Image (cartoon, helix red, strand yellow):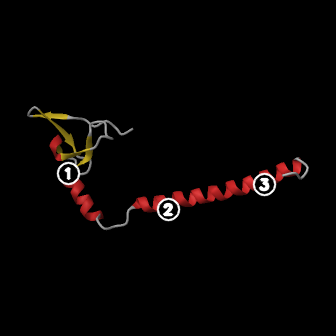
Amino acid sequence: MPAKRTMYMIDGKPHWICAKCKEKKPATDFWKNCLNTNGLNANCKVCHRSYRSKTQGKPLLVSSWIATLERMFMDTEKSWKSHEKMRVKRLIRECGGQK
């Protein structure tokens, strides 16, 4: 669970501190994010845009994460198949060679 961020009241309006530039900004300067406890993104819109412009066009880390999961699944599936084959052979031996 993300840490709760402190809200500051300035001129009767809620303000938050940007996690990147550390400035107090009004709630309208943050994108909405329902996953955070306050409903706002941790970085202000300006910092978010600068981050996105720097990372635009670079390969996403998600693709490597998905590839890793696929490899893990394939390895698990292979080990499960070999384990299942051994289990069937053992059952056949125990039952006297009948299928």
| In front: label 2 or label 1 | 2
Percent position of residue 14, x then y: 16, 35
Mark 3 closeness class: few <14, some 14–19, many ≥20 residues within 10 Å:
few
Secondary element type, mark 2: helix
Secondary element type, mark 3: helix
Q: Residue at x 17, y 41 (%)?
A: 27
Residue placed most toward the observer, 58 or 5: 58
Q: Which residue is identified by label 2?
A: 67
Percent position of residue 18, x then y: 23, 46
Q: Which residue is identified by label 1?
A: 45
Residue placed most toward the observer, 24 or 92: 92
Secondary element type, mark 1: helix
On the picture, is 97 further left or further right than 30? right
On the picture, is 54 further left or further right than 92? left
- Amino acid at pointer 2: Ala
- In the displayed image of the protein, which residue is found farthest to the right? 96
Residue placed most toward the observer, 85 or 68: 85
Q: Which residue is identified by label 3?
A: 86
Quadrant of the rendered image containing residue 13: top left
On the question of residue 26 being in view, the answer is: no
- Mark 3 / mark 2, whichever is N-terminal: 2
Quadrant assignment for the N terminus: top left
